[in-house]
Image: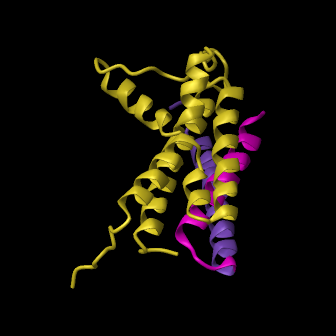
Chain colours: A yellow, B purple
Amino acid sequence: MQESLVYENRTKIAVAFILGWLIPGAGHIYLKKTARGVIFFLCIMALFSMGIFLQGALVGLDFADFFGFLKWFAEVGSGLVYLVAVGAGIGAGEITSFTYDYGNIFLYTAGLLNMLIMLDTFDISVGRKN
Amino acid sequence: MGHFSSLVLYSVLVSIVFALLTKDTQKERALYFLKMFAAFVGLSILSAWFMYLFPFW
C-alpha cells in the first residue's frame, strides 16, 4: 500500500525547505527541532570554513564544463554562505597547496549534506518523520 | 592541518550529521556515530596501507 503523505500546509513545507537551504539547520529550527538545527548549522559551517581554510576553491556556474557544473551544484547547496563567500571573493583556491583537494572535498560535502538536511525538513514537515 | 587531522575532523562532522539524520533515539545515534567514525578512519588507514604495497603505481 502506498504511503499517504500530508501536504496540507504547503507554505510551511516550502518555508522550511528554503530556510534550510539559505541557512543550514534553519529549516529544523523553524520546525521547532532547535537542538538538531543548531548542530546541523555548526557541522555545515565547520565543513565549509575548513574547506576555505584548507585552500579549497569555490567555483562559479559553468554550463560548458559538466564536471564544473557538478562542483558548482555541490557547493551551492551550502546556501547563503556560499553566495556571500563568492561575492566577497573568498575561496579562490590554491591549487599548489597540498590541502587543495581536501578543501574541495570539505566544500562539496558541506553543500551535499545540507541538501540531505533540506530533504529531512521535508520529511518532518509532511509528518513522515519526527 | 595534516592529512590525518583533516580525515578525523571530516569523519567527526559527517558522522554527526548522518547519525542525526538517520536515527531517532540518542542511544542509536551515539552507536551509529561511533560505527561510522570508526569505519571512516579504519578503512582510510587500511586503504593507505594497501597502497603502500604498490609504491610505483
Q: Can residue B21 be seen in this view?
A: yes
Residue A92 on the magenta segment: no
Is residue A122 shown left or right of residue B1? left
Task: Identify the residue at horizontal 64%, vertical 73% (top origin).
Answer: B29
The number of discs equals 0
Pick the front one: A73 or B52 = A73
Toward the bottom, the furthest residue is A1
* Vertical relation: A73 (above or below) A94: below
Quarter of the picture holding the N terminus of chain A:
bottom left
* Residue B55 visible at all: no
Residue A112 in the image: x percent, y percent?
Answer: 48, 45
Q: Is residue B20 magenta?
A: yes
A54 horizontally vs A126: left or right: right
Q: In this view, does A52 lie to the left or right of B18?
A: right
Q: Is residue A62 left or right of residue A55?
A: left
* Range shown magenta: B1-26
In the rendered image, the vertical position of residue A6 relative to residue A34, given as above or below: below
Q: Is residue B12 above or below residue A93?
A: below
Residue sitting farthest toward the left = A1
Image point (70%, 48%), residue name: A42
Q: Is residue A35 above or below residue A86?
A: below
Residue B37: horizontal and vertical position, in percent? 66, 60
